[in-house]
Image: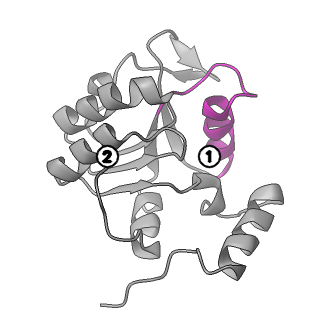
Amino acid sequence: MTTKTEITLNEIQQFFSEQKIAVAGASRNPKKFGGMVIKDFKEKGFDMFPVNPNAEEVQGLKSYKTVADLPGDVKHLLVVTPKEKTQEIINQAVQKGMKMVWVQQMSDTPEALAALKKSGIPFIYKKCIYMFAEPVKGVHHFHRFLVKFFGGYPKKKSN
């Protein structure tokens, strides 16, 4: 398993500073995680770019077959694929020159994280994106409260 220093709040804020976010594992089914994130982040004002090799469109948005097919100005990638697909997506992200990658918890593998670390692309993992995308609501808000209460919430790194 690759080791990485603790994820900082600065890194998380950097990920959200970009309005254009690609989602590998985007689903046409709005009840699946890869569908919910497209819908919810569109509502939060983000420009979403679904990546799904089996879809022409996802929730009215043009879908891209691979990360390589994404427009050149899309530089942040959220990975919500099944673990067996994550390495392939990370390889595509490295080839494409993504500037930042968030591997949603439960999608990460040691090999994929090692490839990201080797590439030098900043990445976030073992974190649920819903706990950080403002405004945080419902169960995610409660989850964030618990994580903060027990000291597991990322800290802001001072310069």
Please report the residue visible at 42 percent of the width from the left and 59 percent of the height from the top: 15
Note whether 94 is above or below 121 in the view shown. above
Residue interval drawn in magenta: 24-44
| Type of colouring | one colour
- The answer to whether residue 19 is magenta is no
Residue extending farthest bottom = 159
What's under tag 2, amino acid-wise?
Leu
Q: Position of residue 13 (x, y in %)?
A: 46, 68
Counting residues from the N terminus, which is met first, the one under dot 2 or under dot 1? Answer: 1
Q: Residue furthest right?
A: 138
Q: Which mark is residue 113?
A: 2
* Left or right position of 45 against 70: right
The x and y percentages for residue 93 are 27, 36
Residue found at x 39% / y 65%? 14
Quickly name the residue at label 1.
41
Q: Nearer the viewer, residue 44 or 109?
A: 109
Residue type, label 1: Phe
Across and down, in percent, residue 63 comes to 48, 20
Residue 54 - label: none
Please say whether residue 125 is visible from this viewpoint: yes
Residue that appears at 59% across and 53% down: 128
Q: Is residue 154 left or right of residue 31?
A: left
In which quadrant of the rendered view does residue 5 lie? bottom left
Query: Relative to the observer, which residue lies in front, 68 or 115?
Result: 115
Q: Residues within 10 Å of mark 2 (few under 14, many from 20)?
A: many
Residue located at (51% from left, 42% from top): 47
Task: Kindly give the residue lying farthest to the front in the view shown.
Answer: 1
Q: Is residue 70 visible?
A: no
Whether the magenta-drawn stretch holds residue 28 is answered as yes
State the separation of the CA atoms marked 2 and 1. Answer: 24 Å
Q: Secondary structure at mark 2?
A: helix
Which quarter of the rendering shows the C terminus? bottom left
